[in-house]
Image (tube, rainbow, N blue to C red):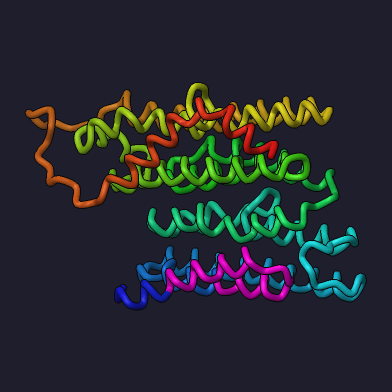
Amino acid sequence: MNPYILATLLFGLGLGTTITFASSHWLLAWMGLEMNTLAIIPLMSQHHHPRAVEATTKYFLTQATAAAMLLFASTTNAWLTGQWDIQQMSHPLPVTMITLALALKIGLAPVHAWLPEVLQGFDLTTGLILSTWQKLAPFALLLQIQPTNSTILIMLGLMSTLVGGWGGLNQTQLRKILAYSSIAHLGWMILVLQFSPSLTFLTLLIYLIMTFSTFLVFKLNKATTINALATSWTKAPAMTALAPLILLSLGGLPPLTGFLPKWLILQELTKQDLAPTATLAALSALLSLFFYLRLSYAITLTLSPNNLTGVTPWRLPSTQPTMPLAISTLATLTLLPLAPAMTALLTL
């Protein structure tokens, strides 16, 4: 792609999200979301492959549906209450409609079916943008409206954690596994949204760091299936040693960073007398942990079948920059000791 066009599209992507962040009027927020969608579509279809074009079309239709639903709900709110302000959502009908529209935008269960299919059609770089940056604007709106209907949020959260766990069990494609992982993590965030918005924000930040690390590991290996991971030890032995730790951090095992949000969310749910919900969420995390362990096993404990005489085959040094991966891996593995500082910030 022409670098000028790429720069323009990335600027549009950033501007759309920033407009949504800064808006207090529903029409402005909707405009930011639309700019976001329109800017990423050429990035998605830049590889003229039938799969990429199909995934782009699915993504466009889904996002257009969610945006239309959002616009309809905000118009309904203005009709019922005379308010266009995002903070002034008092009527339960538009609040519920907007919650469902934003759930469709980010891919929460039961409106999640587009996400694995769409992510599977893209390369890992576009997939990374879709799994991280594209979640920010809808989440900013969710945090602003703070939906009051607790039942719908808990149902969305629990369904997402369960679907995210179950859906990934039978997959061999890494991008689909990461899509189901994304659905499960978003479910955890939605569960605690109404009780502690600041904790949801912290969970989102940690999810972004962990997902960034995981995508970069796969990108450096040029791996898109589980079997392709078996050759990674010959390409980058040091990274192969760290990759299982990154995956286990995504799964939420102590003493890694990923344990922190799960621990704080379970604690918050228990404080709110939702022990059964917390138990179900914790059990669903075991489903996700199974496929992270499966990936860890594929990376570290299996060798690709080969009949080479040497142990390390001839290879060219990677031309990809490794500094972003090094920084994000450090954050993915070592932020747990900062838990007291983070909890202190949450209570401010």
Quadrant of res 44: bottom left
Between 240 and 174, which is closer to the camera in this rendering? 240
Instruction: Based on the picture, tell me whether residue 334 belongs to the magenta stretch.
Output: no
Q: Position of residue 193 (x, y in %)?
A: 72, 44
Quarter occupied by the N terminus = bottom left
Q: Position of residue 247 (x, y in %)?
A: 44, 33
Residue 304 appears in view? no
Q: Position of residue 127 (x, y in %)?
A: 45, 55
Q: Residue at x 52, y 37 (%)?
A: 170
Left or right: residue 323 compared with residue 268: left
Q: In this figure, what is the number of numbered marks? A: 0
Between 268 and 165, which is closer to the camera in this rendering? 268
Q: Residue at x 52, y 55 (%)?
A: 117
Quadrant of res 61: bottom right
Q: Residue furthest left?
A: 309
Predominant secondary structure, magenta span: helix
Left or right: residue 31 compared with residue 307: right
Quarter occupied by the C terminus = top right
Highlighted magenta segment, given as a residue range: 9-35
Q: Position of residue 141 (x, y in %)?
A: 69, 59
Q: Is residue 289 above or below residue 174?
A: above
Quadrant of res 189: top right
Residue 167 appears in view? yes
Q: Residue at x 46, y 54 (%)?
A: 120
Between 79 and 243, which is closer to the camera in this rendering? 79
Instruction: Based on the picture, tell me whether residue 15 belongs to the magenta stretch.
Output: yes
Q: Residue at x 34, y 37 (%)?
A: 227
